[in-house]
Image (cartoon, rainbow, N blue to C red):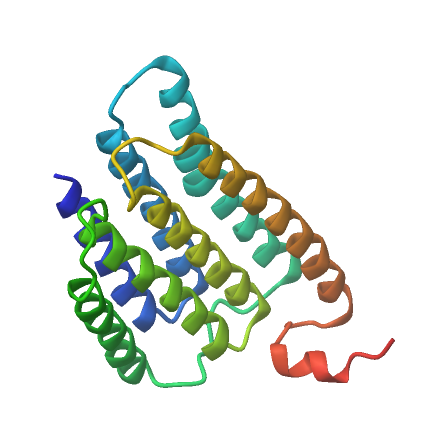
Amino acid sequence: MTDILLIMFAMTLLYMSIANRLLTYIRILVFQGFLLFGVTFLELSHINVTNLVLILLETVVFKALAVPLFLNRVIKHNGITRVAEPFLPNFVSLIIITLIIVITIVLSNSIKDINLDKTFFVVALSTLFTGLYIISTRRKIITHVMGYLVIENGVFILSLAVGNEMPMLVNLGIMLDIFASVLILGVFFNKIGDVLNDPDVNQLRNLKD
């Protein structure tokens, strides 16, 4: 069941590569949050109330609800157009993300470590590189924030790739890191929105001290 959820997560990366609308990106992040909840819940060796609460807070409440709602509010507040405006055509992006997944599969097969779950490793690395790809090939600043959140999801999955028990301290650190990052980027983005009608990374070149 865990492998099925991870495969579904990898499919969301492919879908994100061809998405044009910002609302689609937000919906994918919501879906990824629920998938991460399912994966982490199934991977827990010892289920107790504390673990369950932490999983709910980090994946469902924070990743699937709070952050997407916050991003949607930022988009509406700044009157941003709903198109992601990628630098490359969607077909090219789909091919590149597919190649990323294939390369990570080949890389994982070359690693001989009995403690490493290769499915987790492949999905985690694919998610990390997909997040970096989104950041480097999208014009809007808000999509860069979403790309960073995808990277965080990859780090989350990577923390589960080395064992069956949930590394609580690592995941709590990731959650706090996401909270601080989104808060800072949100404030930064709102300030830019007061100056630029439609924030674009190319327009940042015109900003002066």
Q: Position of residue 21 (x, y in %)?
A: 41, 67
Can you say which quadrant of the picture contains the C terminus?
Answer: bottom right
Q: Is residue 40 left or right of residue 139?
A: left
Residue 67 in percent (x, y) is at 51, 45
Residue 63 image point, x, y percent: 44, 42
Tell how many labels. Answer: 0
Height in image: 135 above or below 32?
below
x 36%, y 43%: residue: 33
Instruction: Point out the residue furthest to the top here.
Output: 49
Q: Quadrant of the N terminus?
A: top left
Q: Is residue 94 above or below residue 184?
A: below
Image-quadrant location for residue 59:
top left
Q: Residue furthest right?
A: 209
Q: Is 30 on the left or on the right of 121, as rendered?
A: right
Residue at figure coordinates x 17%, y 41% from the top left: 2
Say which of 110 and 6 sits in front: 110
Taking depth in this image into account, of 53 and 141 the one nearest to the observer is 53
- At a point 38% along the width and 68% down the height, the residue shown is 129
Where is residue 51? Give x, y as percent.
38, 22
Q: Quadrant of residue 17?
A: bottom left
Q: Nearer the viewer, residue 39 or 22?
A: 39
In the image, residue 57 sits, relative to residue 99, either above or below, namely above
